[in-house]
Image (cartoon, helix red, strand yellow):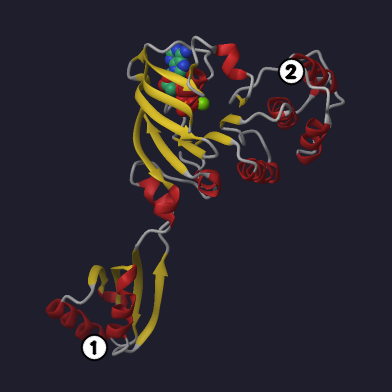
């Protein structure tokens, strides 16, 4: 069953900014990653899904209802965590939680208290004196206190410290276990990689790739790096491969006596058969990560945290 649907969504802000003919859908129980650098169009798309913005072309649907014409209806069973949060500064966190509980008609506060504990939120202070991190936690608690079936998360871990980022990823996994449908936008590979079933990459307002995460994780192509102990043997090996074409060599490093080869999973025995005739220094598999795949689409660098620059 399709829960979220974006169909040929276009919003042109001029100067090539906006989103252009964006389409994807999120099935019930699925965690869907929406990945792209700053300015790619993630928030614009999500604001349309929430019904805050009218499409120029196309439609967005939540549980089959058009977001723009059923805005209040679609939000009832949906938890939305915006990228930028605006909270009433003069209230204390506790007052805000009480206000939101009343608005949502929540009487049983056990879910709210669970979230407060999980995210180690101290809601007692006045919001204008809260740190950004505490405000983010407050936004998390109030976005999900009604235990919605659908979670729409716009860069949810930004502004959280690394420990709370992990807590949040744990929370997403828990919610998935509980059968929730989740759309998660991010510019951070690792959190998408850790949680998502399917992923779309958006760049300059256009979806450039959509794929099933596991198909990449369990890629059938494997790359191995092999180093030979003796130069002579290394040359013999290259000659043999040249003649027999038994292995697909993708890179040769003459000065290091190294090759990279690419094989299909099914050919693993063939690989070991061939190399067992040679005196090897080592043979190691080079793991292909989602990050490698993403990088094909970016001419940018990624820092050590996996953030696209
Ligand atoms: N209300 C708006 N008016 C004009 N331009 C906008 C508006 N909202 C977003 N944009 C532009 O659209 C592009 C996509 O923005 P956004 O959806 O916020 O990207 P992301 O959330 O992926 O960082 C950016 O170039 C941004 O400057
Ligand atoms: Mg954004």
Check the image and name the residue furthest to the front. 1
Quick one: label 2, few (<14), some, or many (20+) residues within 10 Å? few
Question: What residue appears at the point 40 percent right and 70 percent down from the top-left corner?
Answer: 285
Residue 232's disc is 1
Dot 2 falls on a residue whose secondary structure is helix
Check the image and name the residue furthest to the left. 243
Q: Quadrant of residue 124?
A: top right
For marks 2 and 1 on the same chain, the one whose residue lies earlier in the sequence: 2
Locate residue 15, reporting x and y percent.
33, 16
Judge left or right: residue 13 versus residue 182.
Answer: left
Dot 1 falls on a residue whose secondary structure is helix
Please state which of residues 198 and 234 is positioned toward the viewer in this rendering: 198
Question: What residue appears at the point 71 percent right and 17 percent down from the top-left corner?
Answer: 87
* Disc 1 residue: CB within 8 Å of ligand 1: no
Locate residue 123, reporting x and y percent.
83, 27
Locate residue 201, reporting x and y percent.
40, 37
CB atoms at circles 2 and 1 under 8 Å apart?
no
Query: From the viewer's perspective, is residue 61 above or below residue 306?
Result: above
Locate residue 160, reporting x and y percent.
67, 37
Q: Quadrant of residue 273?
A: bottom left
Question: What residue appears at the point 60 percent right and 24 percent down from the top-left corner?
Answer: 82
Question: What residue appears at the point 35 percent right and 65 percent down from the top-left corner?
Answer: 222
Query: From the viewer's perspective, is residue 62 above or below residue 169?
Result: above
The residue pinned by badge 2 equals: 104
The quadrant of the rendered image in which ligand 1 is seen is top left
What's the distance in space between the residues labelled 2 and 1, CA to CA?
Answer: 76 Å
Q: Nearer the viewer, mark 2 or mark 1?
A: 2
């Amino acid at each position: 069953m399709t829960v979220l649907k974006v169909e040929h969504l276009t919003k042109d802000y001029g100067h090539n900014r906006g989103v252009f003919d964006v389409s994807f859908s999120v099935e019930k129980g699925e965690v869907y990653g929406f990945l792209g650098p700053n300015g790619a169009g993630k928030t614009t798309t999500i604001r349309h899904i929430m019904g805050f913005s009218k499409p120029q072309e196309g439609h967005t649907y939540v549980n089959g209802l058009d977001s723009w014409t059923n805005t209040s209806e679609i939000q009832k069973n949906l938890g939305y965590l915006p990228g930028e949060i605006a909270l009433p500064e003069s209230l204390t966190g506790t007052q805000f939680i009480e206000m939101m509980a009343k608005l949502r008609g929540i009487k049983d506060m056990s879910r709210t208290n669970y979230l407060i504990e999980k995210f180690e939120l101290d809601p007692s202070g006045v919001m204008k004196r809260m740190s950004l991190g505490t405000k983010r936690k407050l936004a998390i608690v109030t976005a999900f206190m009604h235990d919605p079936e659908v979670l729409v998360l716009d860069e949810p871990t930004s502004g959280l410290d690394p420990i709370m980022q992990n807590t949040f990823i744990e929370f997403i996994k828990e919610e998935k276990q509980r059968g929730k449908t989740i759309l998660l936008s991010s510019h951070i590979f690792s959190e998408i990689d850790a949680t998502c079933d399917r992923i779309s990459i958006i760049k300059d307002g256009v979806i450039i790739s959509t794929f099933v995460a596991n198909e990449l994780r369990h890629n059938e192509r494997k790359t191995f790096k092999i180093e030979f102990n003796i130069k002579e043997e290394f040359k013999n090996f290259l000659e043999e491969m040249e003649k027999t074409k038994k292995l697909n060599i993708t890179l040769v490093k003459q000065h290091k006596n190294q090759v990279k080869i690419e094989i299909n999973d099914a050919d693993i025995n063939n690989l070991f058969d061939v190399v067992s005739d040679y005196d090897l220094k080592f043979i190691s598999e080079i793991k292909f990560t989602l990050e490698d795949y993403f990088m094909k689409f970016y001419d940018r660098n990624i820092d050590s945290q996996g953030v696209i620059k």
